[in-house]
Image (cartoon, rainbow, N blue to C red):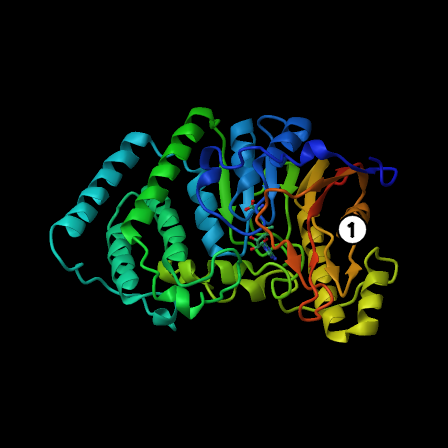
Amino acid sequence: MRIGELKYRDESWDYRTADTKEYTHCFHTYPAMMIPQIARRLLDSYGVEGEWLLDPYCGTGTSLVEASLFGMHSVGCDINPLVRLIATAKLTPIPLGTLDSELKKLNDTLFQVEFGVDKIPDAPIPKIPNLEYWFSQEAISYLAYLLDCIKRIEVQAVQNFIMVAFSETVREVSFTRTGGFKLHRMPAEKLENFHPDVFGIFRKKLNRNRQGLAAYLEKRRDVETSICSTNTVDGELPMPRPIGGYNLVITSPPYGDSHTTVAYGQFSRLSAEWLGLPNARKVDKLAMGGHRTGKIPAESPVSSAIEKIRSVDEKRAYEVTAFYVDLESSINSVVKTLAPRSTICYVVGNRRVKDIMLPTDEFVVATFAKHGFSHKETIVRNIPNKRMPKKNSPSNIAGRTSTTMHEEYIVICQRTDQTCP
Ligand SMILES: C[S@@+](CC[C@H](N)C(=O)[O-])C[C@H]1O[C@@H](n2cnc3c(N)ncnc32)[C@H](O)[C@@H]1O
């Protein structure tokens, strides 16, 4: 169904029944993950084997994994250290023999602890504020012991692989409520009967991920991949640059600031703290819209919506503005790394604030247009699979929720000027 000249709804992009957990895509959940089918289809249309793909907000690396299966080299950036670890593990081709021999050693050790002695050996417990609020004493000792074993693994790639399974285990055995991404403790009546089998959960994740890796190894092409911690809002991007620039961007930036949309940092915090990753508590502040401010020009596609928000809530208007200022800076930085004739595919959500819809898709088109990109098309798809809050309170009136972010926009633009990076 056509919505505008270049904007149309196409249900064939919904992938309602598709398996989104093939290959290493099964490794770890994360909020608002891109589904691999979208990246795959965009690569089929715009990718060229041997060329370079960039994902400036790569999260767990969905488009990077797909690029490696397609035969494109890739670089991904993210400010969240946990997803950098996950993306790295998903992309690393560990020989199965090496992995299996390390997994066997680890399994044997855990087996001895489970069935040999009655008490779990002491292991250093990381200094995490409020640890007992989020974990039972039993879970803490099991996790501490596991982590100690993992840290002894000498092959870095294998250690990363196992840390990813550990990270998901941390979340699952914690007292956090399931079903959301913010850190909320489960209700008291649930806590009493919550006795997760830490080693069992961990083993299940390892087995699942090992199967995913085996499938990935069969199809992965011989390409270069790299993940960096660059905050893409910050001007020059200090990351590997292919000669001539990146040819293709396939990415999904945040829908808005972490505070009022998806709290990537809160989702990752407990795992990141157990693993001792840097900035474990700072991710949401570092993310787009986290702390900056500035102005959106009157002619911007989002400015009239922001003015309407301002008329009812000045603070929300300020937060929304901060996000778009950062998104624009980030696009300005990304553009500097792109090749002439490059294509960008930004998968975005048009969220509502105070019941007012913010046309992020048009904002992306307009921002790239300033750099000589022409709008090719925008495909509107429903989100059946993504892990998103289906309800929120766009009006911020308690109890008044509405279905939100049930669709997203795949914005495709092509560079038509001849500017070299
Ligand atoms: C929608 S998620 C990406 C999900 C990813 N496509 C996947 O499949 O896992 C957006 C990501 O943007 C990252 N992010 C937010 N602000 C950023 C910034 N200024 N620079 C780089 N990454 C940023 C967040 O940490 C988050 O991981």
- Is residue 297 among the parts visible in the rendering? no
- Is residue 16 among the parts visible in the rendering? yes
Q: Position of residue 335 (x, y in %)?
A: 70, 46
Q: Position of residue 278 (x, y in %)?
A: 43, 62
Quadrant location, the N terminus = top right
Q: Position of residue 105 (x, y in %)?
A: 20, 41
149 sits to left or right of 76 = left
90 sits to left or right of 46 = left
- The residue at the point 78 percent across, 67 percent down is 295
- The residue at the point 46 percent across, 38 percent down is 91
The image shows a total of numbered marks equal to 1
In which quadrant of the rendered view does residue 50 lie?
top right
> Which residue carries the number 1 mark?
367
SS state under label 1? helix
Q: Nearer the viewer, residue 246 or 151?
A: 151
Note whether 108 is above or below 215 in the view shown: below
- Kind of residue at disc 1: Thr
